[in-house]
Every structure is written in C-alpha cells, then in structure tokens.
Amino acid sequence: MMNRVTLAASALALLSLAGCVSQPATQEQQSWVAVSVSAPNLNFPERIGTASRSSSPFKVQDTESMAYPLMTVRTCNAAMTDCSAGIVKLESKVTLVELRQNGATARLDLTYQVGRSQTVGDRRSQSVSMSLPADVKALNASQRYSKEVELNYGSVGHIDFPYGVDFAICVAAPKLAEQKSSDADCAGPGVKL
C-alpha cells in the first residue's frame, strides 16, 4: 500500500513539473519586438530600401508609438514617360497583448498617408518636412490598419500598403531581461497579416 502511495505521489510530482515546462509565457517575461518599414528604391526599383528598423524589449501590455522617416515613392507608365510621386508618412502604435508558449499577440495601429508634402515629428519634438516640386504629379493615399495579430515566435508578419510600402513585425521568443535579441531571432517564414 505504501508503494502505491509513493508511486502516485511521484507521478503527481512529475506531472506538475511537466506542467511547469509547458506553461505559457508570463507577464514578467520580456520579448523583443522588431519592426521595419521599407519601400522600393527609386533608383533601382527591383531593390527594396529600408527606411527604418528598430528592435525594443517589450513586456505584456507595453506599447510603443513610432513615426518613421519620410519616404518618397513613385509610379510610372511602362515607357517611364509619365510618372507621379508622393511623400509617405507612416506612424505606428504597437502593443504586446499576450505571450504564449509558441507565439504572441500584438495590437497594431498604423496610419499611412501619401501626398505632395508631409511633416513628421520625433520624440524630441523636432520635426522634418518633405515636399515635392510643384511640377511633379502628386500621388495621394490614406489608409488605417487596426488589428490584433497572432505571430509565431521568429516569423515575420508583413502588411502591404500602396506603392510598394511594407510594414514588417517580428516577435522573438521570450528571454530574460538582460538578454538581447538578434537578427537570427527573426529568421522565420514571412506571413501576410
């Protein structure tokens, strides 16, 4: 009888330990969230130019707002004789909603604008403006994207905007606060969001 009690207690202890290993990430854990914004290179349209890239540590419910550098986009007819251009302004607000065992949920609020001129401010209350010359045909577009997205750790989620602009986000697997993320943490497959 004593052996059965000991065996049952040992089995219960092992199950409890196994449960600890498979528990979802906690709010105390930290993950690195990487974002980048890119657009076609005006001089070499087959290449993509990265306008901005950042990686920040996040805990659950952390939020970061960002205004990216202004970019110029262009569209032309096949003969390249008739072109229009625009200045792109993209702003984001990213909130880490949940860390799970194999992935994370993030809330994305993005504002995308294309026009003849744009102004963007940074965290130090400085602003930068760009304008197209008056004789250039201007592109105009405006779009908002607000959604909670689920990503597997290491995969890169892409949101496409008009004129080839791409917003990408990756959430690295949770790490200890003193550990930093690297590019290898976001080497997983790309997915459209």
Image (cartoon, helix red, strand yellow):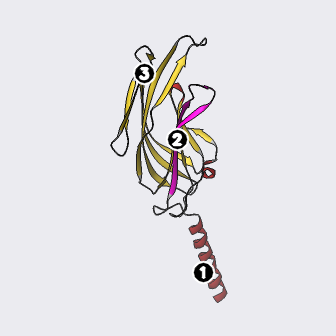
Q: Position of residue 180 (x, y in %)?
A: 55, 58
Q: Amino acid at mark 3?
A: Leu
Q: Which residue is mark 2?
A: 36
Around disc 3, counting alpha carbons within 10 Å, would you say few (fewer than 14), some (14 to 19), or many (20 or more)?
some
The answer to whether marks 1 and 3 mark residues whose Cβ atoms lie closer than 8 Å is no
Q: Is residue 121 left or right of residue 36?
A: left
Number of numbered discs overlaid on the protein picture: 3
Mark 1 → mark 3, Cα distance in angstroms: 75 Å
Q: Amino acid at mark 2?
A: Ser
Q: Secondary structure at mark 2?
A: strand
Q: Which residue is mark 1?
A: 9
Which comes sooner in the sequence, label 3 or label 2?
2
Range drawn in magenta: 31-51
Q: Is residue 71 magenta?
A: no
Residue 132 image label? 3
Q: Quadrant of residue 133?
A: top left
Q: Amino acid at mark 1?
A: Ala
Q: Is residue 90 left or right of residue 172?
A: left
Residue at x 62% of width, y 30% of height: 47
Residue at x 61% of width, y 69% of height: 18
Q: Which residue occupies the foreground of this view, 143 or 151?
A: 143
Q: Secondary structure at mark 1?
A: helix
Residue at x 66% of width, y 87% of height: 3
Q: Position of residue 119 (x, y in %)?
A: 37, 32
